[in-house]
Image (cartoon, helix red, strand yellow):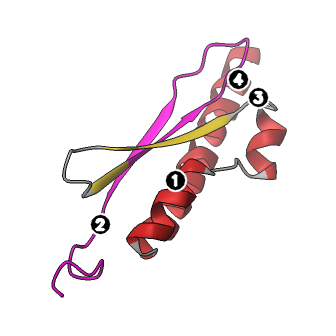
Amino acid sequence: AVKTTRLWQDSRHQQIAIDELSGELDRLTALDSNERLAAMKNLTPSKTLQDISPTVTLSASWEDDAKSAIQLQLNWNTAQPKAPVQLTGWINPIADGASK
């Protein structure tokens, strides 16, 4: 029963992490390129994530040299091993001003 409860809890935590990263990707890809760079350096985990793991961290990096895709990673940093959660979002070059 304990193992099943832990499995359900981990599943819920993964879903919360995916929701959080998805929201961050939506926000980052909607920003103009200058705002995006600053926002990528200043990611802060939500209160919900901090309640799950007080030492949780979010990081952002470029997936490619063209800076057309952002990869977000959430690290739980817990005593109990948990895999990091990663999501990648692509930037629409037309919406980002590349067509000007």
The residues tagged by marks 2 and 4 sit, at their Cα atoms, a distance apart of: 36 Å
Residue hosting label 1: 40
Mark 3 neighbour density, 10 Å: few (under 14) some (14–19) many (20 or more): few
77 part of magenta stretch = yes
The residues tagged by marks 4 and 3 sit, at their Cα atoms, a distance apart of: 19 Å
Residue type marked 2: Ile
Contact between labelled residues 1 and 3, with CB atoms less than 8 Å apart: no
Mark 2 neighbour density, 10 Å: few (under 14) some (14–19) many (20 or more): some
Percent x, y of residue 65: 20, 45
**Circle 1: element type:** helix
**Circle 4: element type:** helix
The residues tagged by marks 2 and 1 sit, at their Cα atoms, a distance apart of: 13 Å
Q: Is residue 95 above or below residue 77?
A: below
**In terms of sequence position, does the residue under pointer 2 or pointer 1 come before the other?**
1
Residue type marked 1: Met
Which span is picked out in magenta? 71-100
